[in-house]
Image (cartoon, rainbow, N blue to C red):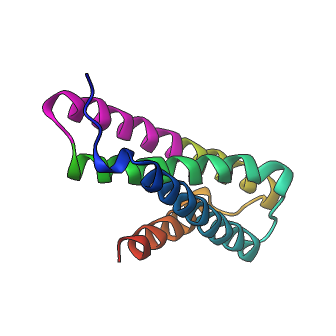
Amino acid sequence: MRRKSNTDAPENRATRIASSGSERERLRNRLVRALKKAGEYQPAVDDFLIDQIVRNTIHSKNAEKFLNSNATELTYSRVADALAKFSKIINDAFHNLAISRRCRLMGEDETGIIKQLEKEILEEFNDAKK
């Protein structure tokens, strides 16, 4: 039988959901601003990939918190595997977003776009850890 931790309490889940919602909006808005600043932001094309990046970034952050707090030998490898999958999804979404934008901008370097967006994500991660 699974033992419930304090984080499973309904009030903690509600707090976590509310904070992840505000975190999701903050991160999403930051990425959209970065794309608008770079030019050629098209919501119909970009929003799906932005949402993938944001959702998996939050999942990754939560998984890291779990590893640092409650992980047992049994769960550690599973959560670490999930982290690797989240990382791949984020990387692929960045790549696809850069390819899509490169096609629209014709000539702008794909790696520059990826680096700019990754910088925004890392800054958001560091702000959230404070």
User: How many marks do you count on the picture?
Assistant: 0
Give 42 or 71, whichever is nearer the viewer. 71
Residue at 27% over, 27% down: 2
Q: Position of residue 47 (x, y in %)?
A: 75, 53
In this rendering, is residue 72 above or below 33? above
Quarter of the image for the C terminus: give it. Answer: bottom left
Give 16 or 30, whichever is nearer the viewer. 16
**Is 106 within the magenta?**
no
Residue at 65% over, 63% down: 28
Q: For the magenta stretch, what is the residue range?
A: 71-91
**Residue 112 seen from this side:** no
Quarter of the image for the N terminus: give it. Answer: top left
Residue at 20% over, 41% down: 71
Q: Position of residue 100 (x, y in %)?
A: 74, 49
Q: Position of residue 38 (x, y in %)?
A: 71, 73
Q: Is residue 68 left or right of residue 82?
A: left
Q: Is residue 48 left or right of residue 125?
A: right
The main secondary structure of the magenta stretch is: helix
Q: Is residue 68 left or right of residue 18?
A: left
Q: Position of residue 119 (x, y in %)?
A: 49, 69
**Residue 105 seen from this side:** yes
In this rendering, is residue 91 above or below 111? above
Residue at 53% over, 63% down: 19
Give 59 or 7, whichever is nearer the viewer. 7
Q: Is residue 43 left or right of residue 86?
A: right
